[in-house]
Image: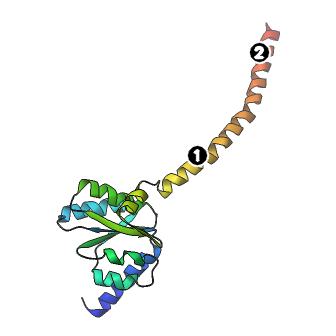
Amino acid sequence: MDRAQKEKLVDELGQIFESSGVVVVAHYAGLTVAEMQDLRARARDNGSSVRVAKNRLAKIALDGKPCASIADYLTGMTVLTFSEDPVAAAKVSEDFAKENDKFVILGGAMGENALDRAGVLAVSKMPSRDELIASIVGCIAAPASNIAGAIGAPASNIASILSTIEDKAAA
């Protein structure tokens, strides 16, 4: 890899560190290519991404970024899982780590907040952005449907009363 490629990689990593809601760092020594492809597919399905980068270049890219605290975790064979959603990458990493003993989560960062192993686990248990939006929409929609039902109920009651009176008058 020549200098220009390294500079481009540092820029890409810098953008990742700048724009990600969460970054999870893990060791992946001993994982097969198929297992790594499985991790990448799971991440892609959940709106996350997986990146393997040289630790030295990643440390350079971290300089001055909000998640600079993860630099201490960048030793050995590390893989970065990241997402704009503050929960998605942590969920993918935790689920994958449960099934693969060789995938060891070291920690991560959520914005400027450093996360240790327990912090990543706690973040993974939080509802995702989509789940929160769905619950908020449900909370907003429930009263509206109740109001619509209450407004419509008297009209249907009046209609049934008029129908009953009409039936009695006709008989």
- Name the residue type under label 2: Thr
Neighbours of disc 1 within 10 Å: few (<14), some (14-19), many (20+): few
- Res 93 label: none
Q: Marks 1/2: CA distance?
A: 37 Å
Neighbours of disc 2 within 10 Å: few (<14), some (14-19), many (20+): few
Q: Farthest residue in the top direction? A: 171
Percent x, y of residue 9: 33, 83
Percent x, y of residue 131: 49, 52
- Name the residue type under label 1: Gly
Percent x, y of residue 84: 45, 67
Please, is residue 40 above or below residue 139 in the view?
below
Give the residue pinned by disc 1. Answer: 138
Give the residue pinned by disc 2. Answer: 164
Decide which of tag 1 and tag 2 comes sooner along the chain. Answer: 1
Please, is residue 160 above or below residue 70 in the view?
above
SS for dot 1: helix
Residue 24 in view in this figure: no
Residue 66 in view in this figure: yes
Q: Which of labels 1 and 2 is toward the front?
A: 1
Q: Nearer the viewer, residue 23 or 158?
A: 23
